[in-house]
């Protein structure tokens, strides 16, 4: 079976890194070892594998050369957790088999510290393959910096991963342990129900209970504050209505038992800022705790990734650490302390801003593309 070239060997003509999530698929195209395109597509995987097939068809239409005989594919996943599958082992095995059919025999699956595996061996390595995308991003970061706190804030989750001594220093190796250590927070800037952020919020001069209903999401908050880029606002709204500011205010108002017409627009913006501050407070507390547990020095930066990287910058400011973007740090030109970049590199100054932004958003897909080697 074809394997990726080992370090130092010639890179394939094209390589695609994939991050197969439960709500989105992210992908990164490399040519001659350099990032040339990055993309994300909505993929409600819990509704069926046909949605993954639709995304693969879109990717193939966008990057036809990535399906020729010399191309290679590398994948990581979190989609094994969706309720389409009986359990995570079932999800890993079925996704591996499905991806192999769609991507071909070159496919290798990322298994964190355990390396890479061919799809036919996914069943016996499922524990290492399941939800390892955070480790890929941190592993790439560790080749570029000595010490940092990776803060990857996506649509649904936040990874808080320390890098110390150019090594991934996470205490948790899987989602269960990372939830226990604080290195995984199931909050993001798009899909998180607002009632998950706080039981009470300040509004109209008093502290009020919130309605524990799926009335609004964090996308409504960051759409109203103007911080969520429309390109990353891909998930359906809580009520199925549009993403206009008027509809957004209506959803926020429901959270506190009001109608949007009850108050001026400025008050709904103020409420959105309260929700933002609640989420920022939780993230900052975890970031400080994770950094302290890892023994990171005070000047070790927060490195922000994901569509919520704007919030990572705010976390860094709140805990008094410098901030850098993943796209800036992960480029070959940013290799720290004279460390040689990997054979697949990217010069950050060659990136147009639009591609640098997607580099941040799709960090795990970029990472597996750049890190990919052979495997069983």
Image (spheres, grey):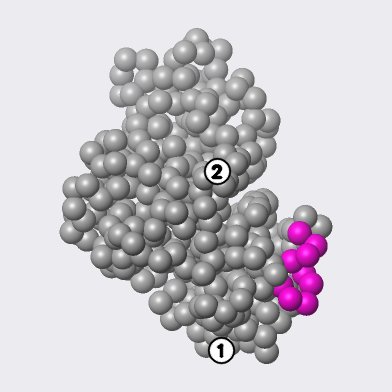
Whether residues under marks 2 and 1 lie with C-beta atoms below 8 angstroms apart, the answer is no
**The label number, if any, that marks residue 32 in the structure image:** none
Which residue position holds label 1?
376
Residue drawn at x 60%, y 41% is 352
Question: Which badge, 2 or 1, comes first in the chain's sequence?
Answer: 2
Taking the view exactly as shown, the residue that stands out farthest to the front is 338
Residue drawn at x 68%, y 89% is 1
Q: Which residues are magenta?
A: 63-71
Q: CA distance from mark 2 to mark 1?
A: 34 Å
Q: Where's the C terminus, which quadrant?
A: bottom right
Q: In screen coordinates, is 5 left or right of 152?
A: right
Up the image or down, 34 lies above or below 285; here it is: below
x, y (%) of residue 183?
A: 33, 58
x, y (%) of residue 129?
A: 50, 75
Residue drawn at x 63%, y 39% is 231
x, y (%) of residue 156?
A: 50, 50
Judged from the image, the secondary structure of the residue bearing numbered disc 1 is: loop
Magenta-drawn stretch contains 64 = yes
**The label number, if any, that marks residue 357 in the structure image:** 2
Judged from the image, the secondary structure of the residue bearing numbered disc 2 is: helix
x, y (%) of residue 235?
A: 62, 43
Answer whether residue 144 is visible to the viewer in this image. Answer: yes
Q: In screen coordinates, is 47 left or right of 276?
A: right
Crowd around label 2: few <14 · some 14–19 · many ≥20 (10 Å): many
Q: In screen coordinates, is 275 left or right of 319?
A: right
Up the image or down, 212 lies above or below 69; here it is: above
192 and 358: which one is in front? Answer: 358
Residue drawn at x 55%, y 43% is 357
Magenta-drawn stretch contains 312 = no
């Amino acid at each position: 079976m074809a394997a990726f070239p080992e370090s130092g060997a010639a890179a394939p003509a094209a390589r695609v890194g994939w991050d197969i999530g439960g709500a989105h698929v992210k992908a990164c195209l490399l040519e001659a070892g350099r990032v040339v395109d990055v993309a994300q597509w909505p993929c409600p995987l819990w509704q069926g594998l046909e949605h993954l097939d639709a995304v693969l068809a879109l990717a193939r239409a966008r990057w036809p050369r990535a399906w020729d005989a010399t191309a290679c594919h590398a994948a990581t996943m979190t989609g094994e957790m969706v309720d389409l599958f009986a359990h995570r082992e079932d999800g890993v095995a079925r996704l591996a088999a499905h991806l192999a059919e769609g991507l071909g025999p070159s496919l290798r699956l990322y298994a964190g510290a355990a390396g890479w595996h061919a799809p036919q061996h996914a069943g016996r390595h499922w524990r290492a393959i399941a939800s390892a995308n955070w480790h890929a991003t941190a592993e790439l970061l560790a080749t570029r910096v000595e010490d940092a706190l990776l803060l990857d804030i996506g649509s649904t989750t936040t990874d808080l991963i320390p890098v110390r001594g150019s090594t991934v220093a996470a205490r948790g190796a899987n989602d269960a342990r990372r939830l226990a250590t604080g290195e995984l927070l199931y909050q993001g800037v798009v899909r998180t129900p607002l009632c998950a952020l706080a039981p009470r919020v300040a509004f109209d001069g008093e502290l009020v209970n919130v309605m524990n209903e799926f009335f609004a999401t964090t996308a409504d908050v960051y759409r109203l504050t103007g911080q969520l880029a429309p390109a990353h606002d891909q998930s359906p709204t809580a009520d199925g209505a549009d993403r206009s500011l008027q509809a957004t205010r209506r959803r926020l108002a429901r959270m506190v038992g009001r109608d949007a017409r009850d108050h001026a627009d400025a008050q709904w913006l103020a409420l959105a800022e309260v929700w933002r501050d609640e989420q920022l407070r939780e993230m900052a507390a975890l970031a400080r705790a994770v950094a302290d547990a890892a023994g990171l020095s005070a000047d070790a930066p927060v490195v922000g990734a994901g569509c919520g990287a704007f919030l990572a910058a705010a976390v860094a400011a709140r805990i008094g650490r410098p901030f850098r973007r993943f796209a800036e740090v992960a480029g070959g030109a940013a290799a720290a302390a004279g460390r040689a970049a990997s054979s697949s590199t990217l010069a950050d100054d060659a990136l147009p801003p639009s591609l640098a932004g997607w580099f941040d958003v799709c960090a795990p897909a970029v990472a597996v593309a750049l890190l990919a080697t052979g495997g069983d």
